[in-house]
Amino acid sequence: MRCETGKLYLFVAIDRKTKYVYAELHPRMTQKTAVSFLRNLQQDCVFKITHILTDNGAQFTLQLAEPSTTA
């Protein structure tokens, strides 16, 4: 989403059963932002979050590179 100050990224959570919607706009799309969004969601939500489905964007996945070994 573009605005006068640049780009903003929309983070959205929707509960499929109750149709509860939670959304935030952020200037960056990073893992730190995703964690902040999920924490804010958890605080705002009146029910327990048991499952999270994502689009597998880099901000929602944590991949650690294994150090390569040489013989």
Image (spheres, helix red, strand yellow):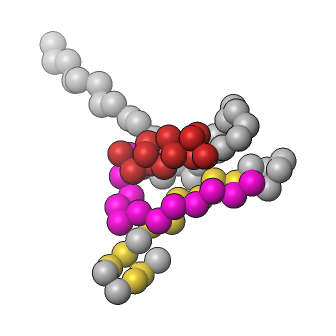
At horizontal 63% and vertical 56% (from top left) the residue drawn is 22
Left or right: residue 30 compared with residue 60: left
- Considering every residue shown, the one lying at the far left of the view is 71
- Considering every residue shown, the one lying at the far bottom of the view is 4
Using the image, determine if residue 33 lies above or below residue 42. Answer: below
At horizontal 74% and vertical 49% (from top left) the residue drawn is 15
- Tell me if I can see residue 38 in this picture: no
Q: Say if the magenta span includes residue 66.
A: no
Residue 6 in the image: state x and y as whole percent.
32, 79
Q: Say if the magenta span includes residue 23.
A: yes
The part of the image, by quadrant, that contains residue 50 is: top right
- Considering every residue shown, the one lying at the far top of the view is 71
Residue 3 in the image: state x and y as whole percent.
40, 83
Residue 35 in the image: state x and y as whole percent.
44, 42
Foreground residue among 14 and 47: 47
At horizontal 39% and vertical 51% (from top left) the residue drawn is 33
Using the image, determine if residue 32 lies above or below residue 28. Answer: above
Number of numbered discs present?
0
Using the image, determine if residue 7 lies above or below residue 36. Answer: below
- Tell me if I can see residue 70 in this picture: yes
Foreground residue among 50 and 48: 48
Point out the image quarter for the C terminus.
top left
At horizontal 43% and vertical 46% (from top left) the residue drawn is 36
The part of the image, by quadrant, that contains residue 70 is: top left
Residue 1 in the image: state x and y as whole percent.
46, 77
Left or right: residue 38 compared with residue 19: left
Question: Which region is colored magenta?
Answer: 20-31
